[in-house]
Amino acid sequence: MVNRISKKDVEALHLFQSRNRLLTAIREQSLQDPEDQDRSLIYQHCCTIISDAFGCDFVWAGDIDVNQSSLISVASTPKASPHHARKQQQLGDILIERFGPHLTQFTAPCYLQFDDDSKIGAGFWPPYCAVWPIAYQTRKYGFIAMHCTEEFNLGELKGEFISHVMDDLALAIYSQDTTLKLKSERDFNKEIVDTIQALMVTIRPCGTILSFNNRAEEVTGYTEQEILEKYWVDVMVSPENRLQFQQTFSKILQGTQENINFMVPLLTKSGSQRYISWHGSIRHNIETGQVGLVMLGIDETDNLFAGQQLNMFTARWEKIFIAMQDPALLVANDFTILEANPATFAAAKKRREEVIGKNVCDVLHGGHGDLAQCPLELLIGHQKTQISETELHGLHGTYMLTVSPLIEENGGVNATLLLARNLTEEEVIRAEAIRVAQLAAIGELASGVAHEINNPINGIINYAQIILDEPDDPEAPDNLRNIISEGKRIAGIVSNLLDFARRRKEIPTCSDIAKIIGNSIELMGHLLKKDGITCSIDIADNIPPLKCNEQQLQQVVLNIISNARYAVNTRFPEPCKKKKIDIKAVLINKKEGKFIRLTFTDSGIGIVPEIRNRLFDPFFSTKPKGEGTGLGLSISHGLIRDHGGFIRVQSKPGEWTKFTIDLPLIFQ
């Protein structure tokens, strides 16, 4: 006997198969990457299945755009025509009017029948419409609208079917939304982990690596895929330290300590060593969890190297500070001496404990005296370096004091460095150097002066012999006058030489530049004449008196003329017309004021560029050994600088050399 399947069973089987197709489509979508899932395909499958199950003429899915209060059509079966689109929008208007733009009151199916008096209007086909909300818990995902030519009579099976389909659809869309949100949160968290400037490593309870962020990849040189599931000690610790930290890690996991901190050298993939400071956090109940330890690491390699460099530089600075021959003090903003070098203790004639921690004014000036505030205290804590010449009674002398602020990275000044150079000793050394150069110049002038004096002496002797032989000669008075004249000439030469050689106080006076040059030429005249050197002098008439140290300027002029003579004689050993020295003096205007410019041009061998920058260095000389001290131009440069002036040199090797001196009329 054959059992016949009832019509109800056939219908139930058909509805089951339709629902199963929908669930299969949902399952296929869920297997894709969340970002690749297409929600409209699920809606489309739903519309197709409902149309097939109910025999509807038109089924479509839609939602309401809350911002625009307008309809959004998502899918339809069959494809919507322009006429359908207009009618869909009219139906959307009805739903908004009944349930609001959020469809918050739309919780149950809505059945509509349209006739000639309906809002949709005559001609809309088919006339019967059922609208089902798509909702999961409190979330709304739109609706499904079914249009049929016959009135809806769902019955028990179809009622359950459409209810289950709506639930399946709502759950699928909810799951898809939840998956996307979770993925977005995971991506966001991973982005945070990858952007932090610390190594972040998660480790299983067994010690294998579970995750590795971008910073860890950068520092170690390994990619995350290369080290996943490897034992962390083998990757994160250098070989010689692995056993020690493996034992430490085991003890940590067995103990109750939740946080650990340690520093360990790490061997990178390239073989270099980095020093990582780790902070580890233990997960509670790690026996049941996947992550056993979360470790954050900071690469301290550069900091350690910088610390070593800082220590090295600090030690070097301390050595320099101690070795300085001039007093040096480090002073706080409250004027307390923080540190001082041995030269300070020696100059102050005090022990270290009598200086460190004391007021700087009490140590350097011997106290404030009648002043409410020491002038030195006004200089401490300022942003600019200041240099002044001052007498420091506490250091028993006159010093050139340099006050330099030690500026921090934030621009503030927490301490000031004081350097005191003993001018008393320096002036003695400088005066001795000038004296050495002066004596060298006198030695060079001596032979010329001797010849210069010899001629008038011979004349005196001859005139005296004539008078002695013929005392009654009518020309005897003239011969006596000649003797007096020659004697005065000798006296003038000797006086000029003595003026140059005599020690004088360095007090500027108003002097005639023509007289300085003339006296210099008179001392050098015989030597220049003997060598066959022509010396021309051109001094402008408008040059006013110059406030200067006459003896020092004469020493400069003599040194330059002497060097010019040597250069000319080197190029032309024998007398000739090309042996020349030209001296000029003019008045010029600069932005700083009026200056007297002296130029000395010779036709000598010139100066090659390689040594031009060394001309003013102490003890540098181009003359053969024994013929020059190397102090002449160095001292001349210092003397001109002391007068507020400038000296420079120009030369064409093998042809000429020109020294230019600019001296300010107002010299302070």
Image (cartoon, rainbow, N blue to C red):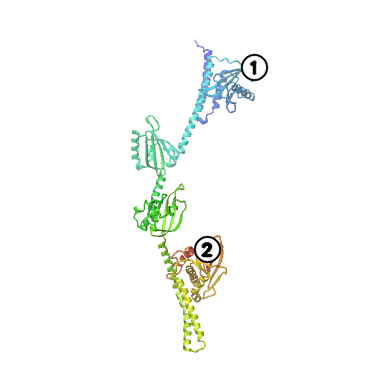
From this view, report whether residue 439 is shown above or below residue 393.
below
In the displayed orientation, state which residue is furthest to the top.
1
> Disc 2 residue type?
Ile
What residue appears at the point 44 percent right and 41 percent down from the top-left corner?
218
Residue 52 pos. (x, y %):
57, 20
Residue 101 pos. (x, y %):
58, 24
Residue 290 pos. (x, y %):
40, 31
Q: Residues within 10 Å of mark 2 (few under 14, many from 20)?
A: few
Q: Nearer the viewer, residue 335 or 308?
A: 335
From this view, report whether residue 272 is shown above or below residue 159.
below
Query: What residue is pinned by disc 1?
Result: 115
Compared across the picture, whether 479 is left or right of 277 comes to right
From this view, report whether residue 443 is shown above or below residue 289.
below
Q: Is residue 602 visible?
A: no
Compared across the picture, whether 260 is left or right of 527 comes to left
CB under 8 Å between callouts 2 and 1?
no
Residue 316 pos. (x, y %):
38, 53
Q: Nearer the viewer, residue 105 or 408?
A: 408
Q: Nearer the viewer, residue 519 or 219?
A: 519
